[in-house]
């Protein structure tokens, strides 16, 4: 049974989501503040975390919690579920390492579908490595089953969404992938600006490993492609 953590300071909302998720077969633990959630995560990581941004007297407590959880695990799926719908907050959430950013007007069936999609992807990490799951493109190597990416033999810590975007680009170097293509490959439904934010974060992670990294090209008006060696 998958264990989901919900960090939401409004009791009625937290209990509503808890009841719905339990009915779908998930084990759920709820927290109304960042310190309690962080202590629980330090004891045992959840299989997925749903986090609000504002937590009690901490206006951006959810951002801080996301950073802490991402430092503990580069792959545990994280969803922001918040009333804050500005582009600034969305970009900040993704930069903190979240895999998804939803607003509280999102329907419950849609939320359940997004959770299921993230679990399907993270479950691939438990599969054994097989030779046909390995892909190499020059300095890039990708283990699809383990969802691991290395550049010049250095591991690049990507979220599950970022992993599938890199995989989609690298499997056909030189071919342009539209933002819609990347959404389809990553099994997410977000707006174009969110895809752009993901790509910027991916580039930044590669550049942190290699300042000369320049393989992800922007094709203006069309999308992105993995450049040649």
Image: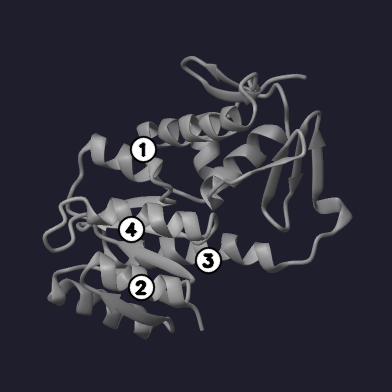
> Horizontal placement of 163 versus 48: left or right?
right
Q: Position of residue 18 (x, y in %)?
A: 29, 79
Residue 65 is tagged as 4
Q: How would you rate the neighbour count of disc 2 (Cα within 10 Å): few for under 14, some for 14-19, many for 20 or more?
A: few
Query: In the image, residue 145 lies at what x, y percent?
Result: 73, 58
Tally of numbered discs: 4
Tell me if label 1 and label 4 are in contact, CB under 8 Å.
no
The residue that label 1 is drawn on is 191
Residue 52 disc label? none
Distance, label 3 to label 1, CA atoms, is 21 Å
First of labels 3, 2 by sequence position? 2
Residue 78, quarter of picture: bottom left
Q: Is residue 171 left or right of residue 208?
A: right
**Sooner in the amino-acid sequence: mark 1 or mark 4:** 4
Disc 3 secondary structure class: helix
Rate crowding at label 4 as few (under 14), some (14 to 19) or many (20 or more) other CA atoms within 10 Å.
many
Between disc 4 and disc 2, the foreground one is 2
Secondary element at image label 2:
helix
> For the residues carrying marks 3 and 2, which lies nearer the camera in this image?
2
Crowd around label 1: few <14 · some 14–19 · many ≥20 (10 Å):
few
Residue 169 locus on image (x, y percent):
64, 33
Residue at image coords 72%, 26%: 173
Q: Report which quarter residue 211 is drawn in.
A: top right
Counting from the top left corner in percent of width and height, residue 26 is at: 43, 81
**Label 3: few (<14), some or many (≥20) within 10 Å?**
some
- Separation of marks 3 and 2 at Cα, in angstroms: 23 Å
**Which of the two discs, 1 and 4, sits closer to the camera?**
4
Question: Outermost residue toward the right?
Answer: 131
Q: Residue at x 55, y 52 (%)?
A: 160
- The residue indicated by pointer 2 is 39
Which residue corresponds to mark 3? 119
């Amino acid at each position: 049974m998958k264990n989901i953590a919900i960090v939401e300071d409004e009791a009625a909302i937290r209990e509503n989501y808890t009841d719905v998720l339990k009915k779908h077969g998930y084990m759920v633990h709820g927290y109304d503040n960042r310190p309690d959630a962080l202590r629980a995560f330090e004891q045992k990581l959840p299989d997925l975390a749903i986090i609000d941004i504002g937590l009690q007297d901490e206006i951006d407590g959810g951002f801080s919690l996301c950073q802490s959880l991402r430092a503990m695990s580069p792959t545990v799926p994280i969803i922001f579920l918040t009333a804050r719908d500005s582009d600034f907050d969305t970009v900040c959430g993704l930069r903190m390492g979240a895999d998804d950013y939803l607003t509280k007007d999102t329907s419950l069936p849609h939320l359940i579908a997004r959770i299921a999609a993230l679990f399907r992807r993270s479950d691939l990490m438990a599969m054994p490595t097989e030779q046909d799951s390995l892909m190499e493109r020059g300095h890039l190597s990708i283990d699809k089953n383990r969802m691991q990416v290395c550049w010049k033999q250095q591991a690049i810590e990507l979220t599950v969404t970022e992993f599938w975007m890199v995989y989609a680009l690298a499997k056909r170097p030189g071919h342009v992938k539209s933002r819609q293509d990347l959404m389809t490959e990553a099994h997410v439904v977000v707006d174009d600006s969110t895809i752009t934010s993901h790509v910027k974060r991916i580039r930044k992670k590669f550049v942190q490993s290699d300042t000369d990294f320049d393989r992800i090209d922007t094709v203006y008006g069309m999308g992105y492609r993995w450049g040649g060696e």
